[in-house]
Structures are given as C-alpha cells and as structure tokens.
C-alpha cells in the first residue's frame, strides 16, 4: 500500500466512498515533496486545491511585509486543511511552510466540489473538521492571554494529537526543539526549559528529536 493509500485509509470520509469513487479521488490528487522551509502554499494566491499532509510536519503562519510573523497551528500526518478558503472562494489568507521535508497531497478544486455536492460522509467530515478547528483557534487565543509559556507550549503540543484533525499521529512524535519553538512561537532555549518542566511533571519524555506523550489529558490541562 502506498503512502497516499495509507492516508486515505485513515481519513473517515474516504473510507466511506465506493471503490470507483475512491479511485477517481486518487486520480485527482498529486503528491508533492516540499523541502524544509519550503512553501506548501502562500498567502494571497488563488486557491485551486484542498491540501493534506501525507508525511511530515508543516505550520500554518502569517508573514507580514514588515517582517513580523506569527504561527497558528502545526499540521502533521493525516491532516487535511484549506477547505475554508475553497468554500469562500477567496485568495488564501495564510502561508503554510514545511518545518521538515514533507509529502503533501494536492486535491483538485473540482474533485473537492464534487464530493461536497454528492457525498454526505464528506460533508459530515467537513462540519466536524471546521468545528474542531474553530475550537482549536479559540483555545489558542485563550491560552495566549491567560497562560504562561510552559502551559502554552503544553497546549500547543497537545493540539497536535487531536485524533479528528490529525488521524495519522501517534503518541510518539518525531520533532525537534527548534520545530516546537517555531510552532509555539518561543525560542529554542525556552522550549528546552518548558520540556524539562513537563517531563518532571510526568507528562512526556523528551529524547533527541522525539517526544513521547505519557499523559495527553494532563498535557491538555497543564497550568489550568
């Protein structure tokens, strides 16, 4: 089984398609390799695809011409994104940048629209996905305003393990401290301090280039 087949097999909407429908979906998807630091898509461009992370780690961000930048969310294996821009038929409002070399699925707009018009499971998936993403962004605003750096980083890590948004993720994540810092918007040195705090609390184990989550619920509620 290829990497795209594995991703679609983990996608609840794809599992409910007929064999013929699934084959047509595959024909309208191109998988591209994006190098670390490369753009998966760019702010201001015309939206022609629905996007998915087959393998890798990318971040949704906004980079201003003034040089200021902010990261919104990390997107890991199995995640689909960009449906909002397709539904509104507007120019993309954010950048998506690969934090490491990543394999990205680009589904044609026409296939996305076809599924939207004809597949009840696909529509149900989109409703759940948009609701989960809304909750994620509301939580980010709350965390930014009310929590200290250790707690914000804990919630940032916990958000990567949402089984609805990231069905391909496991409780062991290959990620560097630099990548965590880029997702959470803090320095690498501060990430190191926060990880030590979370490790001492028994919530995770930090090894070189890998995080193992020991208590996901505790991570979600750290600092509350």
Image (cartoon, grey):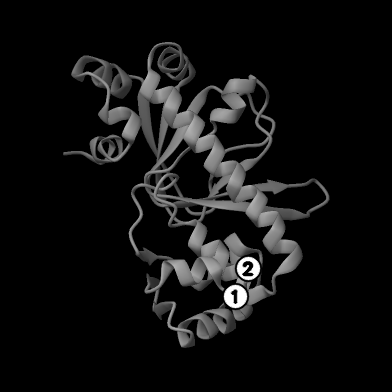
Q: Residue at x 56, y 48 (%)?
A: 97
The quarter holding residue 53 reads top left
Residue furthest to the bottom: 200
Looking at the image, can residue 40 be seen? no
Residue 203 x %, y %:
44, 77
Judge left or right: residue 161 versus residue 1. Answer: right
Q: Is residue 188 visible?
A: yes
- Above or below, 196 relative to 107: below
Task: Please identify the quadrant where the C terminus is shown.
Answer: bottom right
Q: Residue at x 37, y 24 (%)?
A: 121
Vertical placement of residue 44 versus 68, above or below: above
Q: Which residue is mark 1?
A: 188
Residue 185's spot in the image, x, y percent?
A: 66, 64
The disc label shown at residue 57, or none:
none
Query: Is residue 114 depicted above or below 194 in this figure?
Result: above
Residue 152 - label: 2
**Distance between mark 1 and mark 2 Cα atoms:** 14 Å
Residue visible at 29% across and 24% down? 26
């Amino acid at each position: 089984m290829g990497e795209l087949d594995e991703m679609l097999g983990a996608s609840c909407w794809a599992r409910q398609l007929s064999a013929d429908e699934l084959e047509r979906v595959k024909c309208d998807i191109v998988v591209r390799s994006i190098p670390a630091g490369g753009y998966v898509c760019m702010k201001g461009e015309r939206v022609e695809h629905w996007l998915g992370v087959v393998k890798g780690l990318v971040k949704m961000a906004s980079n201003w011409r003034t040089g200021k930048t902010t990261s919104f969310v990390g997107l890991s294996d199995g995640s689909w994104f960009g449906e909002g821009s397709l539904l509104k038929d507007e120019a993309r409002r954010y950048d998506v940048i690969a934090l490491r070399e990543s394999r990205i699925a680009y589904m044609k707009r026409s296939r996305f629209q076809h599924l939207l018009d004809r597949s009840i499971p696909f529509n149900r998936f989109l409703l759940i996905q948009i609701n989960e993403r809304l909750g994620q962004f509301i939580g980010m605003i709350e965390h930014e305003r009310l929590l200290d750096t250790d707690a914000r980083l804990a919630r940032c890590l916990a958000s990567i393990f949402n089984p609805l948004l990231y069905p391909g993720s496991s409780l062991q994540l290959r990620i560097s401290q630099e990548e965590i810092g880029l997702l959470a918007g803090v320095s690498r040195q501060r990430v190191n301090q926060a990880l030590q705090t979370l490790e001492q609390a028994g919530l995770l184990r930090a090894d070189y280039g890998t995080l193992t989550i020991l208590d996901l619920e505790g991570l979600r509620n750290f600092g509350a």
